[in-house]
């Protein structure tokens, strides 16, 4: 790696200064909102959604600093990228606190939780998860394909898929897929994204199991995401898709059972 000159370093510090100021402002705002939640829990869920958006904005500034580093210093700013990864995790956690982190669960199990964000319309919910998905994709691209955090992103993607599902009022989703509904467009786009994310999360957990950990927990989580996807298909009346996912679940479950038995046999031998 070429030596970084004093001029390059000074230029870098000059260019990132406004972004660092924004980052500090957002962190201060985060602390203020958390104090507000402690004092008054009446609108805690909505305030947590504000925190979700705040953290997404914070992560975007952290990723900009990495871009400036690459432009001025010709190197990635790994420390700032790691901060961005932690920030995105916080964003997901805040959303989990608002809508639960349930994966393969009936809507009735977390329906009551959504009462706290009832005032947020379908478009607002879709735009928030869309923004989160974009931020995660940008961060993964910033790290690149050969990052040591490759398999860590499987968990982040999975948790994102779960909250992208849980933030939607699935009870009203069927009615909102009527073209005459004012919430038709965001509902259809949200459902499309949700189904894609759940399927990808399942595949990524199986990939992690096959290529990295060989831990049955990872394979089971992949199967759980298939279960979640199947529930959505059933709820929306997509019978053929639900049957396709069910068959995939059965094949994966049989594969897992075979792998477990093989491992037990090898252990005894």
Image (cartoon, rainbow, N blue to C red):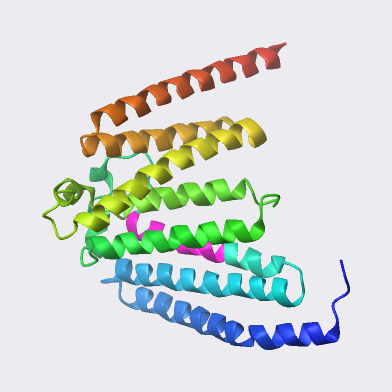
In magenta stretch: residue 65? no
Q: Position of residue 104 (x, y in %)?
A: 36, 38
Q: Which segment is the magenta one? A: 86-99
Left-right relation of 128 to 177: right
| Count of all numbered marks drawn on residues in the image | 0
Point out residue 170 in the picture as x, y percentages from the top left corner: 23, 48
**Residue 181, image x, y percentages:** 13, 56
Quadrant placement of the N terminus: bottom right
* Residue 265 sits above or below residue 61 on the image: above
Q: Residue at x 58, y 63 (%)?
A: 86
Q: Is residue 89 magenta?
A: yes
Can residue 214 be seen at all in this image of the molecule?
no
Residue 235 visible from this viewpoint: yes
Which residue is painted at 84% across and 77% down in the image? Answer: 4
Please report the residue visible at 26 percent of the width from the left and 71 percent of the height from the top.
42
Q: Quadrant of residue 259?
A: top right
């Amino acid at each position: 790696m070429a030596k970084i000159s004093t001029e390059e370093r000074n230029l870098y510090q000059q260019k990132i200064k406004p972004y660092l100021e924004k980052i500090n402002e957002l962190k201060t705002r985060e602390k203020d909102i958390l104090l507000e939640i402690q004092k008054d829990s009446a609108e805690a869920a909505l305030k947590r959604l504000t925190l979700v958006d705040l953290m997404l904005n914070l992560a975007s500034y952290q990723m900009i600093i990495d871009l400036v580093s690459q432009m001025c210093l010709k190197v990635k700013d790994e420390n700032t990228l790691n901060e961005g990864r932690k920030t995105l995790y916080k964003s997901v956690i805040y959303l989990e606190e608002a809508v639960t982190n349930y994966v393969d669960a009936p809507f009735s199990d977390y329906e009551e939780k959504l009462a706290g964000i009832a005032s947020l319309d379908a478009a607002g919910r879709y735009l928030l998860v869309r923004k989160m998905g974009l931020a995660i994709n940008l961060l993964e691209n910033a790290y690149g394909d050969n990052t040591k955090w490759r398999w860590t992103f499987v968990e982040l993607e999975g948790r994102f898929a779960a909250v992208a599902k849980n933030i939607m009022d699935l009870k009203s989703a069927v009615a909102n897929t009527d073209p005459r509904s004012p919430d038709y467009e965001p509902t259809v786009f949200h459902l499309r994204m949700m189904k894609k994310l759940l399927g990808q999360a399942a595949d990524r957990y199986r990939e992690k199991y096959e290529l990295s950990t060989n831990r049955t927990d990872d394979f089971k989580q992949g199967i759980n995401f298939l279960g979640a996807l199947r529930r959505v298909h059933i709820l929306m009346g997509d019978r053929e898709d639900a049957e396709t996912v069910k068959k995939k679940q059965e094949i994966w479950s049989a594969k897992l059972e075979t792998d477990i038995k093989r491992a037990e046999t090898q252990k005894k031998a």
